[in-house]
Amino acid sequence: MLIPTLKENPADAEIKSHQLLVRAGYIRQIASGVYSYLPLGKRVLRKVEEIVREEMDKAGAHELMMSALQPAELWKESGRWNTYGSELMRLHDRHEREFALGATHEEVITSLVRDSIKSYKRLPLLVYQIQNKFRDEKRPRFGLLRGREFLMKDAYSFNESFESLDETYDQMFTAYSNVFSRCGLDFRAVIADSGQMGGKDTHEFMVLSEVGEDVIAYSDTSDYAANIEMAPVVMDYPSSNETPKELSKAATPEQKTMQEVADYLGHDLDKGLKSIMFKVDEQFVMVVTRGDHETNDVKLKNFYDADIVELATEEETRQLLGTGFGSLGPINVPEEVEVVADRAVEKLINVTCGANEEGYHYTNVNPSRDFNVKAYADLRFIKEGDPSPDGQGIIQFARGIEVGHVFKLGTFYAENMNASYLDAQGKSQTMVMGSYGIGVSRTVAAIVEQYHDESGITWPSHIAPYQVHLLSLNPKKEDQQRLADELYEQLQAAGIEVLYDDRKERAGVKFADSDLFGIPLRITVGKRASEGIVEVKERQTGKQDERNQSEIVDTVRQWFDN
Ligand code: ATP
Ligand code: MG
């Protein structure tokens, strides 16, 4: 069997799931973010897939499989050919026709459904597939957590109305909770960003983990939880009773960062303004926040209802404002630049900001008096200690791995791609859609993040590649070999999944590999083989016991039933 274990962690593997899955011979990297699943890895993937299938089927979804190769025309119809960006893997066929490798399948499914469904009598419709997706991620890393080719379950719903979509969404939400519970994961469903796709509700399913790339803002007293990108800042900022002083300019030579400038001028970070230049679609925008706050580009994107938000380059900034990043500020900016500011800035008195002149800052700046803004809006990230947006408790942070995403798409795709149906009155109506994704391969990695110890993986019993790891310690000894062979037959005949290690290796090597693999029950045939006695050990707890050959099948069955 192809289980190439390694003694050392691969040099590029920073996190446990990546290290252990490679070391234990589950996966191998083929190119950056591209992996092959070896027999053990494939079995685990299949276990997770099966759980997903069962829950999808139970929710009334039907499995299909769409093409991974997608003609560019469909993406042009939805408009995403231009907005999806360089994550979309694009290619040409021999006739120079453009294609994409499926990063997601809204376009393909919408074209399928619009061509085949004409009547309200066929709605609602819920379909799913489990298939490799391709995304040319900027930073593929952490093994299976962020790949460029990865296994996803994607489901799509088509409904007559938003009310009907709400029902389907709730069913999928429940199905997702079931999937992740059955995978043994400690997770939370959090409110997420619905982006520019015209969607409404959307939730991400986050596995709680230190290595997660997402930050969850949750209330310490209620069940409110949101992706930090999304959590609105609801607090009222108090007015200051300081007397406004006259605007003046101060030299701040060599002071580059907010902190350096604040120290140099002798004030706290929250008495400075931070100004950052963005390009929002084609518009240059300066976003102003309080010095101790972080600009939230997702909120900026939503504020402008924009397709693309990116930082302006230092060169663009220099051209527009005549100065680089260190001395930017909202006073006297040219017309081409729009200024928007976070709500926390509005009532500030006597603060400092860059003077758009290398090495100078304005002091005693009073926003309402000294510069114009297009709007004051909620444009900053929420912070720990801020009030919870639901009005109950205060916000705390935790890190999470996004393993699933449910999304009310609304009519974005159906409108762009003309997916309509005739209602009971014979009137044409636009279909209302939802989409629902689970990162199947990412889920496998997330499980390892929550299930491992210093010796290896400790799979939950229903996820492990096999139920039992059978070791014959010394296959050269005839009684050991015979008993192990018999047990292997008996267990297999009982429908139990067994991995049988009959290699001619030292006992120490076999035990170490066994711990690394993480199969829940280990049965070791050793010295007492002649009496028909073997050792049974639980991987997770380390608990061990001796058992007679005749009890083994029942012992294993009972263990897995509990
Ligand atoms: P992320 O923010 O992590 O890039 P996403 O918002 O792009 O995720 P979706 O488009 O909602 O992800 O895809 C559905 C699911 O597919 C995600 O919830 C995640 O579990 C999984 N997924 C997305 N990108 C990757 C990737 N590069 N590697 C592995 N799984 C992924
Ligand atoms: Mg992504």
Image (tube, rainbow, N blue to C red):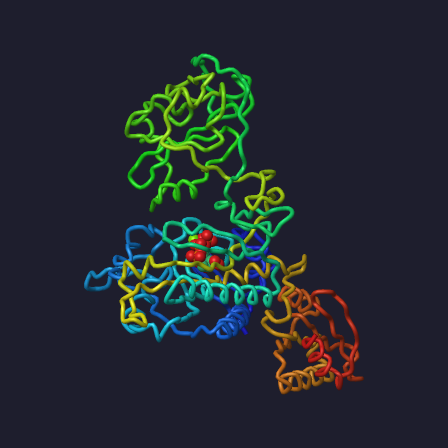
Please identify the quarter of the rendering in which residue 186 is found.
bottom right
Give the image location of residue 354, x and y in percent: 42, 22
Q: Quadrant of the C terminus?
A: bottom right
Quick check: 29 left or right of 424?
Answer: right
Q: Vertically, is 16 above or below 494?
A: above
Give the image location of residue 439, x and y in percent: 48, 61
Q: Quadrant of the N terminus?
A: bottom right
| Residue depicted at 31% across the width and 63% down the height | 430
The residue furthest left is: 95
Q: Vertically, is 297 above or below 463?
A: above
| Residue depicted at 61% across the width and 38% down the height | 385
Give the image location of residue 41, x and y in percent: 53, 68
The front one of 299 and 133 is 299
The front one of 334 and 558 is 334
Can I make out residue 32 in this image? no
| Residue depicted at 49% across the width and 56% down the height | 203
Quick check: 529 left or right of 437?
Answer: right
Can I make out residue 542 in this image? yes
Give the image location of residue 545, x and y in percent: 79, 73
Please identify the quarter of the rendering in which residue 547 is found.
bottom right
Q: Vertically, is 96 above or below 335?
A: below
Q: Exactly how many numbered labels are in the figure?
A: 0
Q: Vertically, is 105 above or below 39?
A: above
- The quarter of the image that holds ligand 1 is bottom left
| Residue depicted at 46% across the width and 16% down the height | 363
The front one of 223 and 25 is 223
